[in-house]
Image (cartoon, rainbow, N blue to C red):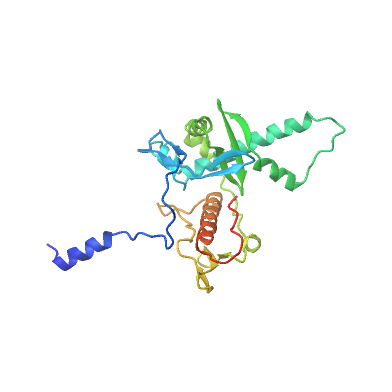
Amino acid sequence: MDSPAVETAKRRSKRKLQKHNSQPHDVELRDVLCVAGGWARRPVPLETQEFQGCRMTAVSATGHWLPQVLQGFCRTEALGTLLRQLNSDLHRCVAEAESQSKHAQQVGEAPSGSKQASRKIFREPHCVAFRGSELTVAWRRKVLFVEATSKSVAALVSIIKTYTKTDVEKCQPAKAESSEQDAKTENTREIRWLFGPKSWCIHYEDENGKQRSSSRGLSVPTTTFQGEALPSEEYMRVREDVRIKAMKLWNSLDRSNRERLALA
């Protein structure tokens, strides 16, 4: 039997530190969009972004809502691998639909073939029909977004459940797309990428006008919970999720008169 001191130490080790706002906000009630159903025990709040007037939510294996809705779905070993295949398939559907639309244009109309125009296409919400379901999707920084409606979210879950392990194994691991040059273009006065620890670091001004920096909670994992290396595309998605987290943190901590960072 452990001594009282040991028991006390064990209890303390189980305690979780809670962060408190240094500047509390006004108390108010808000209507929050949530997703319910599947294997989720309770409604899960959704974070959304506006895509040309269309309310969208990110689809990620490391997000809050999708893993909870699909936690009883075990056809594949990793949800991230499945989503990589789904992302590729939906991307192809949108590209094919856009190609057909271009062919239907008048001959005299000059088509835009630039890479920038091509990337812009996928940033726009598209309604696609795939595997017997219809949903609205779009991409930002190669992250898949689905329209935050019951129809599109339910269609996405339905499509995911049609995949088998054999389907997912056909998807070859993508080459790592992060490079030193990429990080240079992403680095800003407020946020920088640290190669050594593989972490984002924010640089902000506190209420006393002192310049500070922090990378706490902004490291990017390179392995799964099972200790396996993250596929390169999934790693890039996680890296982007943490970058957005860093932007939100900078917005909340910085007390300078600089413009807040746009999360879109």
Please indicate, yes or no, whether residue 77 appears anywhere in the rendered image. Answer: no
> In this rendering, would 84 be left or right of 20?
right
- For this orientation, the residue located farthest to the right is 108
Which image quadrant is residue 99 in?
top right
Looking at the image, which residue is at 62% across and 32% down?
127
Residue 55 in view (yes/no): yes
The relative height of residue 32 versus residue 244 in the rendered view (above or below) is: above
Q: Position of residue 88 (x, y in %)?
A: 60, 40
Residue 137 location (% of width, % of height): 59, 37
**Quadrant assignment for the N terminus:** bottom left
Horizontally, is 110 left or right of 157 in the view? right
Q: Position of residue 253 (x, y in %)?
A: 50, 63
Give the quadrant of residue 70: top left
Location of residue 48 in the rendering, given as x and y in whole percent from the top left corner: 53, 43
Residue toward you, 183 or 149:
149
Q: Residue at x 57, y 67 (%)?
A: 256
